[in-house]
């Protein structure tokens, strides 16, 4: 049974802990600088916990670093001595931190994998992309199985990771921004806030299901009657630069991710 150690019990690490704790194929451990964050996972999900990253590394075959990008260096310095002369693998979910930057902090030949998940993992509907260095390829199926427990996973070359970070890593926040704007617009038109929220959330959820089986253009065309209300909205939104703003937003986020790696 693969022993998986999750470093950082925050939003991403915590989502994995909740889902993996019940899985038969893994033995799960976790560390965090805040012992109080770990206690619920130990008490409610039977996860083995420790405040020491080093101790977790000793007890794990595969480590998943779920800490902020600027904390990765500290974690690597703590776990690197334990990895010397072993086949233990390290996976990072940190935005912008490249495999080669991680390799520099670890013994030569360490299997290193990189995953870009998103926060929808917390409800089991995450999207994630994964890649690895040469020695890490053997561990790819295991890491994909782990992230499949919190949603959809696919392989993607590392050169596209900053773009993917901008697209789906930050994606839930863009959808939430759009949802908030829609709700506000409904309220402005006189719809009670709770009704507006229910209508918007239902519309986003339903559209997501439609988009699984049809293209975005098909959905648009099915809704847009020539000369109708949707067409009027599209003209107004385009005039305000809606699509251009989306392109600019993704480009800015991708550039920010590239900056984290420098
Ligand atoms: N959240 C997202 O939507 C999202 C999406 C895609 C990718 N990611 C990536 O996932 C990573 C984790 O993000 P998150 O949102 O889950 O972060 P988070 O909620 O802040 O969780 C990180 C946890 O690790 C702890 N920590 C900090 N330094 C540590 C250390 N040296 N050893 C052990 N634990 C340490 C943090 O404590 P403190 O709070 O005291 O620092 C915190 O409890 C990031 O690198 C991010 O780029 C996040």
Image: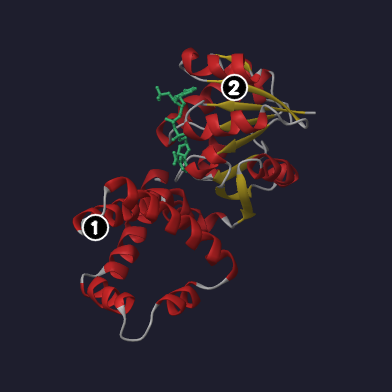
Residue matched to label 2? 30
In front of the other: 91 or 153: 153
Locate residue 55: give its quadrant: top right
Vertical comparison of 153 with 51: above or below: below
User: How far apart are the alpha carbons under marks 2 and 1?
Assistant: 43 Å
Residue at position x 51%, y 25% in the image: 9
**In this rendering, position of residue 92 left or right of residue 4:** left
**In this rendering, position of residue 196 left or right of residue 209:** left
**Percent position of residue 219, x then y:** 48, 73
Q: Say if disc 1 is inside 8 Å of ligand 1.
A: no
For disc 2, the neighbor class at 10 Å (few under 14, some 14 to 19, many from 20) is many
**Residue farthest toward the bottom in the current orientation of the protein:** 226
- Residue 106 seen by the camera: no
Locate residue 226: give its quadrant: bottom left
Residue at position x 52%, y 37% in the image: 122
Q: Which mark is residue 185?
A: 1
Secondary structure at numbered mark 2: strand
């Amino acid at each position: 049974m693969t022993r998986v150690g999750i470093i950082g019990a925050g939003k991403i690490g915590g989502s994995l802990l909740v889902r993996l704790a019940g899985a038969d194929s893994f033995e799960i451990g976790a560390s965090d600088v805040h012992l109080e964050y770990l206690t619920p996972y130990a008490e409610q999900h039977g996860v083995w916990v420790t405040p020491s990253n080093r101790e977790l590394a000793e007890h794990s075959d595969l480590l998943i670093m779920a800490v902020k990008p600027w904390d990765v260096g500290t974690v690597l310095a703590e776990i690197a001595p334990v990895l010397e002369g072993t086949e233990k693998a390290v996976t990072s979910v940190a935005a912008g931190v490249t495999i080669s930057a991680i390799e520099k902090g670890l013994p030569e030949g360490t299997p290193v994998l990189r995953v870009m998940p998103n926060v929808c993992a917390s409800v089991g509907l995450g999207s994630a992309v994964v890649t690895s260095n040469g020695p890490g390829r053997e561990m790819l199926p295991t890491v994909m199985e782990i992230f499949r427990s919190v949603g959809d996973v696919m392989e993607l070359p590392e050169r596209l990771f900053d773009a993917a970070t901008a697209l789906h890593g930050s994606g839930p926040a863009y959808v939430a921004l759009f949802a908030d704007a829609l709700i506000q617009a409904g309220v402005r038109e006189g719809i009670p806030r709770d009704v507006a929220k229910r209508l918007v959330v239902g519309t986003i959820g339903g559209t997501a299901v439609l988009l699984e089986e049809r293209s975005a253009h098909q959905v648009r065309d099915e809704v847009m009657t020539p000369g109708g209300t949707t067409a009027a909205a599209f003209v107004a939104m385009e005039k305000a630069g809606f699509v251009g703003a989306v392109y600019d937003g993704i480009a800015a986020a991708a550039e920010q991710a590239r900056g984290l790696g420098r």
